[in-house]
């Protein structure tokens, strides 16, 4: 039986958050340094930032009650025991 703990998915999600944060900072830096900071770019940037904050908040509130020590079965040899 091959199992992995559930917190592995949490680490993958945290890696995704780090990559997202880096790209967001690069994006805002590019907007400010190129002088394209207009009202339209401000509105779109604020909208994306607000959606990201709301997504992270709701994700956090949903993940509070999870037992991260739970093991997930990836492969179990007994699944193929009664095929033939």
Image (cartoon, helix red, strand yellow):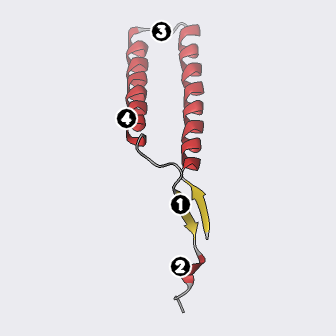
Question: Is 41 in front, or is 74?
Answer: 74
Residue for badge 2: 79
Residue in view at x 43 percent, y 15 percent: 41
Mark 2 residue crowding within 10 angstroms, few (<14) / some (14–19) / many (20+): few
Q: Which mark is residue 72?
A: 1
Residue for badge 4: 58
Residue for badge 3: 37
Question: Is 83 in front, or is 38?
Answer: 83
Measured Cα–Cα span from mark 2 to mark 3 = 58 Å
Which circle, 3 or 1, is nearer the viewer? 1
Relative to 48, does residue 16 appear above or below in the rendering?
below
Which circle, 4 or 1, is nearer the viewer? 1
Q: Position of residue 44 (x, y in %)?
A: 40, 20
Q: Which mark is residue 39?
A: none
Kindly state the secondary structure of the residue where label 1 is placed: strand
Measured Cα–Cα span from mark 4 to mark 3 = 30 Å
Q: Position of residue 43 (x, y in %)?
A: 37, 16
Question: Of marks 3 and 1, which one's residue comes earlier in the chain?
Answer: 3
Q: Is residue 34 left or right of residue 67?
A: right
Residue in view at x 54 percent, y 43 percent: 10
Measured Cα–Cα span from mark 4 to mark 1 = 24 Å
Question: Of marks 2 and 3, which one's residue comes earlier in the chain?
Answer: 3
Q: Quadrant of the N terminus?
A: bottom right
Q: Is residue 35 left or right of residue 55?
A: right
Residue in view at x 53 percent, y 16 percent: 28
Q: Is residue 73 left or right of residue 62?
A: right
Kindly state the secondary structure of the residue where label 2 is placed: helix
Kindly state the secondary structure of the residue where label 4 is placed: helix
């Amino acid at each position: 039986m091959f199992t992995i703990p559930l917190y592995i998915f949490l680490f993958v999600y945290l890696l995704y958050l780090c990559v997202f944060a880096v790209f967001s900072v690069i994006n805002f830096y590019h907007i400010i340094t190129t002088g394209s900071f207009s009202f339209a770019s401000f509105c779109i940037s604020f909208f994306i930032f607000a959606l990201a904050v709301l997504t992270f908040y709701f994700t956090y509130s949903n993940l509070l009650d999870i037992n991260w020590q739970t093991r997930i079965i990836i492969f179990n040899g007994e699944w193929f025991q009664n095929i033939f």
